[in-house]
Amino acid sequence: MSKPKIGIRPIIDGRRMEGLEEKAFIMAKRAKELIEANVKYADGTAAECVISPCAISGSREAYICKEAFDKENVVATLSVTPCWCFGSETMDMDPLTIKAVWGANGTERPGAVYLASVLAAHEQKGLPAFSIYGRDVQDTEDQPIPADVAEKILRFARCAVAVGQMRDKSYVNIGAVSMGIAGSQCDADFFQRYLGIRAEWVDMTEILRRRKYKIYDEEEVERAFAWTKKYCKEGFDKNPEPHTAAQKAEEWRDVVINTIICRDIILGNEKLAAKGYIEEGNGRNGILGGFQGQRMWSDWQPNADFAEAILNTSFDWNGKRQPTIFATENDGLNGVAMLFGHLLTGTSSVFADVRTYWSPEAVERVSGKKLTGRAAQGFIHLINSGAAALDACGQVKNEKGESVMKPWWEMEQKDMDACMKATDWCPAALDYFPGGGFSSHFNTKAEMPVTMVRVNLVAGLGPVLQIAEGYTVELPEDVHALIEKRTDPTWPTTWFVPNLTGKGAFKDVYSVMANWGANHGSFTYGHIGRDLITLASMLRIPVSLHNVPEEDLYRPHAWAAFGTSEPESADYRACAVYGPLYK
Ligand SMILES: C[C@H](O)[C@@H](O)[C@@H](O)C(=O)CO
Ligand SMILES: [Mn+2]
């Protein structure tokens, strides 16, 4: 399938002054090189750009360019110019492309005047565009792209290809609603109109059918099972009446097969087609999925903790491979948060219950200890019934020895080994999961920059995005053990501290937890709040909570027309006026 591309449009004055066309094409070429060298699709390949076959000085050339772009799956256009040109005659009028205009800040010819003029036209016509304009004047002969311009081009491109990668894909609900969790009530209209994603439903009984008739790659199942036996250490069994060794052995086999089946349902598998199962082989064109589990499945079948943990991780028995975003409890809204993080970084996203706020006072009361460092103001306990991506264990290191989560394509054998070593697999808590199964259990033993994300749906308002940049923290071993024991010592734990600003929801750690919109959150490695904000503006999803500095906000130029002193409320008004991308 063709990749979503960035189309670059060199714009010129129709009077074609000496050298203009060449200068515009040099800008286009430089932008293409910059994007292709720095932006990647989530499959690890370089983002692709196409340059218009002709310079654009008016509507005929704009049409020739559009015709070429239509054949190339162009999701976003970057118009570039060194000079004055004719705004509404040259602009990209396609309602579906994400748009940016880069006008060179020069004095010889007024590229920035064109930029202002064409942005006014975009605003008048209801087609928001990002403005790119360097802070410092450049001479016409200046070749390299200034750093501030490069940053804007790259943020635009990174977010636009994320939009393109979602478009026309599917969200595969395996099962329905888990335990009345509203995020798990898939709103097909939201997925379709805001993300361009088709909602699909597959009953959980499909897994039983495929198991019964061996609709899977039997060779892979054997290989996966052998790998699991070798690398998945069984952990602490907290059940007063544990399952027998024979029961557990059967559950291991089932959870491995279930994982492969869930992946095949979402992504398809040529091997199934080769076995005569053409429909199953096609999969569902999924870009993410979710599994209901509780209760109708997990009341008698092994739970999906293993499937969720492994699919969301950046490797499995086949080595490193792109994570498949797979939401616990079929909380598709959290799945979307995970997807955003993954598409922007290529790393795994981590699903978690936002379980407990621990104040410094409460920690001292139960442990007798006063915490220092990042945890001194309290922390939030992120934990899940064992389905978090193993990449979050904090044992993957960069060349400086710092704990990181890597884009999946950078994973090395030693990183995968470290994740497997840091994780044990505890028999599921049978009071919750009578059917058994195994929960991935680890502690994020590292201080890593991460960003927590969540999408919420609000009646009368629509979707909103929440973002909290912060750090994972390590607690003293005894405090960790004490709190873990009070909660669930068989599930993966991450202690999270948001960066505080002293204002609003970021007044203190308690307020972040108090303002969180649901029982779940996702986190992604790194401080990616600014990319998320740009992406949300492309999708017209307002951001209801974030701690990103104001100078890092980058949204379409039209947002300024909705007010400049309070960007958060302007964002709401702009998103309401423009509405979802796919009407
Ligand atoms: C096992 C329990 O039912 C948990 O799965 C439950 O507390 C949740 O995760 C709710 O989000
Ligand atoms: Mn949950």
Image: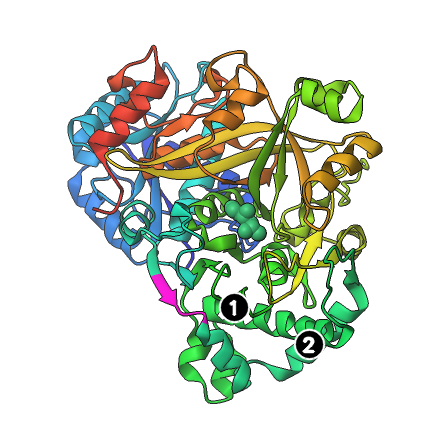
Q: Amino acid at mark 1?
A: Cys
**Residue pictured at 32% horizontal, 13% vertical:** 564
Q: Could you tell me residue 202's position as x and y percent?
A: 39, 68
Q: Amino acid at mark 2?
A: Glu
Q: Which residue is mark 1?
A: 262
Mark 2 vs 1, N-terminal side: 2
**Residue pictured at 41% horizontal, 34% vertical:** 465
231 versus 386 height, above or below = below
Q: What is the quadrant of the N terminus in the image?
A: bottom left
In the image, 343 versus 25, the foreground residue is: 343
Q: Could you tell me residue 49's position as x and y percent?
A: 43, 48
Q: Which residue is mark 2?
A: 250
Instruction: State the residue lying farthest toward the bottom.
Output: 276
201 is within the stretch colored magenta: yes
Numbered label attached to residue 127: none
The quadrant where residue 197 appears: bottom left
Direction from residue 233 to residue 69 in the image, left or right: left
Residue 29 is at least partly visible in this image: no
In the image, 406 versus 218, the foreground residue is: 218
Q: Secondary structure at mark 2?
A: helix
Direction from residue 409 to residue 564 in the image, left or right: left
Q: Could you tell me residue 442's position as x and y percent?
A: 73, 47
The quadrant where residue 383 appears: top right
Q: Main secondary structure of the magenta part?
A: strand
**Residue pictured at 69% horizontal, 55% vertical:** 440
114 versus 213 height, above or below = above
Q: Secondary structure at mark 1?
A: helix
Direction from residue 326 to residue 85 in the image, left or right: left
User: Marks 2 and 1: CB-CB under 8 Å?
Assistant: no
Q: What span is in magenta?
A: 200-204
Direction from residue 410 to residue 162 in the image, left or right: left
